[in-house]
Every structure is written in C-alpha cells, then in structure tokens.
Image (cartoon, rainbow, N blue to C red):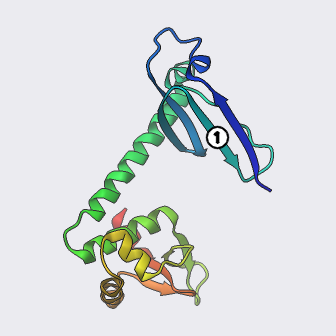
Amino acid sequence: MVGTAQVSATASQLTSRRVNRTPEEAFLGFVGAGQPFEIVAQSPFTLQAYAHVDQTSVLWMYWHDLDNWPHFRREVMDAFRYQHQRKLLWLSALGQRRTIDRLLGFLTLLIEEYGEPSISDTDPDVIRGYCLPFPLTHAQIGSAIGSTRVTVTRLMGKLRQRGLILTQGDNLICLPADSINRAS
C-alpha cells in the first residue's frame, strides 16, 4: 500500500522564527538513510512526500536547524560530500573520449553502487564477481554513454574477450571480483 503525506505551507509560515529572511529557502530532506537531498525554492512553495510503506513520518528542516545537532550535521555533510565525489566520478567516466572507456567506466560505477555478489557455482565460499541486480539493454547503455546499440554490442564483446566483464543468468552484467578489488 502506498501512503502519502503532504507538507504545504508558505515560506513565511516556515520561516517565522528566522531573523534573516531570504527570498530563497533551502529545504533539506532524505530519500533514505545516508541519502540527503536539497531543494532550493522561492516562496510560496508546496512540498509533497510519497511513501511506499505505512507509518512513514515526514519532517522538514533548514540548514540552520542542523546547528542544534552538530553530529547529525556532520553526518549530513559527509553524505553530501560522498554524493559529490560520486558525481565527479560519473562525470569523469562519461567524459572519456574513447567509447570503450566510457562504457567500462559506466558499468564499473553502476556495479560499484548497485552490484550484488555473484557466488561461484563450484565453491559457494568464492565470490565470482559483482553483478547488476537488473538487466540493461545495449540500447539503454548506448543512450546513457552517448553511443549506439551496435557500438555497445561490439564493445561489450571486446570487454568480455578481455575478461573485464562477465554475463550471468538473465543477461545480468558482472565485473569479475578481482577487477573490483583492483579499482578499490
């Protein structure tokens, strides 16, 4: 069941306790644990939150509210720093000149963020590699890296021949465990 919660107020209501009023307000929220986001909006504005579980709480705060909780502020700043570093890695990978480098960088970052361990068929104690938990078509990958489906298919074959990627089950893309360990 999908629960919904609405937060609706004017900027003047939300900032009535503030001394310095600015035309823009920064709203701080969390998608999940360790995943903060910031919205900058001009008044008046309306915020809506949708939850996919029952008994979801919605609270809002501004940056100055974090001054009351220095440890929480530090955790929020660390999470934003991590997000920023990941965005720089994405920009670096997708900014590569050679398509094969963009492709490998894209797959590596996706698998680092969302990959799940792939256990060896012969020895359950051995991790074969890390796989995306969802299939991607070559057309989707081509769209993401600014290339064509045909080029992605050809380059995926080259990466497979070099042992830099594997496929498993329902065409799930995997990186060998030793390539993840080398990248770390």
Helix, strand or loop at mark 1? strand
Residue under pointer 1: 48
Location of the N terminus (image quadrant): bottom right
Answer with the quarter of the image where residue 126 lies. Answer: bottom right
**Position of 114 relative to 140 (above/below):** above
Q: Residues within 10 Å of mark 1 (few under 14, many from 20)?
A: few
Indicate the amino acid at tag 1. Gln
Q: Quadrant of residue 118?
A: bottom right
Residue 158, position in %: x, y? 30, 88
Left or right placement of residue 74 versus residue 170 in this view: left
Q: Give the camera-side residue of 155 and 33.
A: 155
Residue 64 position in % (x across, y down): 50, 20
Q: Which quadrant is the C terminus positioned in?
A: bottom left
Residue 11 place in picture, x, y as percent: 56, 22
In the image, what residue occupies the spot 50% across and 35% down? Answer: 76
Whether residue 43 is situated above or below residue 119 in the rendered picture:
above
* Residue at horizontal 33 percent and vertical 56 percent from the top: 89
Q: Provide residue 70's location: percent of width, then percent of height.
A: 52, 23
Q: Which residue in the rendered view is the most extreme toward the top?
A: 19
From the viewer's perspective, tell me whether residue 61 is left or right of residue 7. left
Judge whether 148 appears above or below 180 on screen: below
